[in-house]
Image (tube, rainbow, N blue to C red):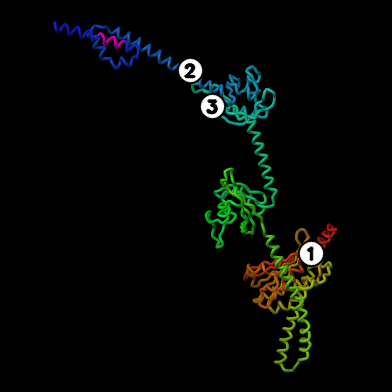
Amino acid sequence: MIKQKTTNSNYTLYQLMLVYHMIALILVGADFFIIHQIPYVKAHRFIGVTTDMIVFCSMVGLAWFGIKRIKRKEAAILETAERYQSLYDNHPDSIISFSLDGEVLSANDGIESLLGLGCESSMLTSFIPMISPPDLLKALHHFQVASAGMPQNFEASFIHQNGFPIPSNVTFVPTKVDGQVVGVYAILKDLTEVKEQKKVIDKLYKQNQLILNSVSEGIYGIDMSGRTIFWNQAAEAITGWKVDEMLGRQIHNLIRPEKTDGTPYSREESPILNTVLNLDDPIMREDLFWRKDGTSFPVEYMSSPILEEKGHILGTVITFKDITELKKTQELLIKSDKLSAVGQLAAGVAHEIRNPLTALKGFLQLLKTNNTKEQYYIEIMQKELQRIEFIVNEFLFVSKPQATNFATRTIDAIVMSTIELLHPQALLENIQIEADIAPELPPVSCDERQIKQVFINILKNALESMEQGGKMRIQAAADPTQRNVLIRFIDQGCGIAPERLPKLGEPFYSTKEKGTGLGLMVCYRIIEAHGGMMEIRSKLEEGTTVEITLPSAQTKDNEGVFAS
């Protein structure tokens, strides 16, 4: 009895388990059955449930589970399709779907706002009628490349329904299904407003460049890192650096590259950058800038900060000008003041000296003696008096303008006459004079006496500088235009130090121990009075070259005609 009760109780328990598992199998699916497979086997063995019943229940559960999964996938696909359709329909750009043959399959609403095309428009049926003719070949090329599977981006104009072109940014994207390209999507973005803004920007940029380039002073801008952000034409002309060479480059090692000892500046040490980047207020200073060819020149520059709306410094604008001519003018004014003082002094000194000098020379002539020693002293006094007289004459030339009698003369004749005059002195100094005079030199309009005085002064100085002897060359030739005659005196003397060259021609400045500097000053004044130029180049222990340029008589005549 007890055993029977236990068996009946177990039977009822397994029946309940079987029903529970079948319901779960139907609702949840095969996974639940697999996990609980052992209880089923035990149950059907115990209570006599057939295997067919279990298989049937399993198939029903699997079918139910598959249907639910399919419905979930369909819902997900529908949601994704709606999302893409929403993107397609509501995208602000115009989107057109083309077949591989160029036929329009669909288009979003943006096409109407861009091109004014409705769904029934004849232009919305094919690719070709939509493209502006000048851009057709380019668009066809990109369409073919996109049809091969490679996205394309370019600019082209599409035709509006009313006939005018609409500039657009075009993106061709291949449409792929199962890995195969079946069409092309075209995404069009209207560039009309962008083009108009670009025109305005270009116009403003051109106006800005015209303003910058019309200024005679050099202007450039740098950012806070010291890199150049703009560079005008005057800056190009002054420094020799082109815009393309300067933009984006560090300015400190180009404009002011070296310290006084010749070592390069670092960015932190650069006086230009420290001056212009660390001050908020405009400043004006003088400095030396370097050209591209390595030469330096004096500048006066002003820097002003570039400020944004909140007052933050973005960089600096530097305006500079070459003050080389200004410096020369200042030097000329100083020289003019010196000459004026010298002229006033010379007039007084010459007047006071000439009278007693005449008496001394006269009485010295009366002191002739047969005593050799005394006669030697007298000759020394006569030479010194002659020297005093020569200096007095130079004083008079400086203090009083000399009458100039211009006449047409040939330079070769004046040069040869000068050589003949100083040839004996050259022989005594063991110096050989060579004359290289071009044939048929154009004549010059000059005062022969004064030009000869210049040549004698220069040649005499050259001979005196060649203490060891050597070769003295004199060249005379016309320039290619025949408008000027060039005369060069080239010696092999001791030369002149570079720092002394700029001061040559100043009164009372001479490289000779007993010189007054008045002779060279007189030479400069005579050449300038003749409308010419005189330039001196020299190197220590190598020699000196004096180059004189005189306008030809024909040039002076033409200038006179134009002046009248």
Amino acid bearing label 1? Leu
Residue 441: which disc? 1
Kindly report the secondary structure that dominates the magenta region of the rendered protein.
helix
Amino acid bearing label 2? Leu
Amino acid bearing label 3? Gly
Sequence-wise, the earlier of marks 2 and 3 is 2
Q: Residues within 10 Å of mark 1 (few under 14, many from 20)?
A: some
- Gap in angstroms between the C-alphas marked 1 and 2: 102 Å
- Gap in angstroms between the C-alphas marked 3 and 1: 80 Å
Sequence-wise, the earlier of marks 3 and 1 is 3
Secondary structure of the residue carrying numbered label 3:
loop
Query: Residue drawn at (83%, 57%), measured in percent from left and top?
Result: 562
Work out whether residue 293 can be spotted: no
Residue receiving disc 2: 78
Query: Who is closer to the viewer here, 196 or 544?
Result: 196
Sequence-wise, the earlier of marks 1 and 2 is 2
Query: Who is closer to the viewer here, 58 or 547?
Result: 58
Asked which quadrant contains residue 515, the reply is: bottom right
Q: Residues within 10 Å of mark 3 (few under 14, many from 20)?
A: many
The percent coordinates of residue 30 (x first, y second) are 33, 14
Q: Provide the residue span drawn in magenta.
A: 15-22
Query: Residue drawn at (59%, 46%), measured in percent from left and top?
Result: 307
Residue 149: which disc? 3
Residue 41: which disc? none
The percent coordinates of residue 398 (x first, y second) are 76, 73
